[in-house]
Amino acid sequence: MKLPLLSGMQALGALERLDFFEVQRRDTHVKMKHPDGRTIVFPYHDEIDRYTLKGALVDAEVDIDEFLDNV
């Protein structure tokens, strides 16, 4: 599945709706954590590379369809 081009703000909002909360923000990257212990780090840019975002979602075991439903 091909992800749409999203901004860091859109990705942050979708992850917050999936119960992730922001833990740290360094330079241009955001680290978020889920109450069950999963973590995700992604770039907070105007436009996030699709493959970078998809890799971060896979690493954090976030269902891509569920993520897209919350964008």
Image: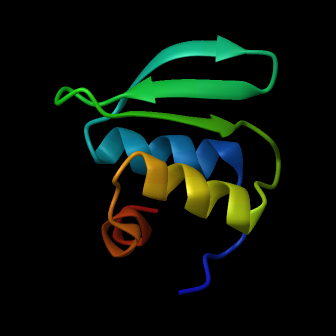
Relative placement, left or right, of 6 versus 62 is right
Q: Which residue is painted at 61% across and 84% down in the image? A: 2
Q: How many marks?
A: 0
Q: Quadrant of residue 28?
A: top right
- The x and y percentages for residue 42 are 64, 39
Q: Residue furthest left?
A: 36
Q: How is the image coloured?
A: rainbow
In the image, is 19 to the left or to the right of 42?
left
11 to the left or right of 46:
left
| Residue sitting at x 35%, y 56% | 62
Residue 9 horizontal/vertical position (percent): 63, 43
Is 40 situated above or below 35? Answer: below
- In the depicted view, which residue is nearer to us: 18 or 40? 40
Q: Is residue 46 above or below residue 36?
A: below
Tell me if residue 6 can be seen: no
Determine if residue 7 is in view.
yes
Which residue is at the far bottom? Answer: 1
Q: In the picture, residue 4 is in which quadrant?
A: bottom right
Q: Position of residue 22 (x, y in %)?
A: 45, 21
- Residue 40 lies left or right of residue 63; in this view the side is right
Q: Say which residue appears at 76% left-offset and 54% top-offset.
A: 48
- Classify 28 as above or below 59: above
x 47%, y 44%: residue: 13
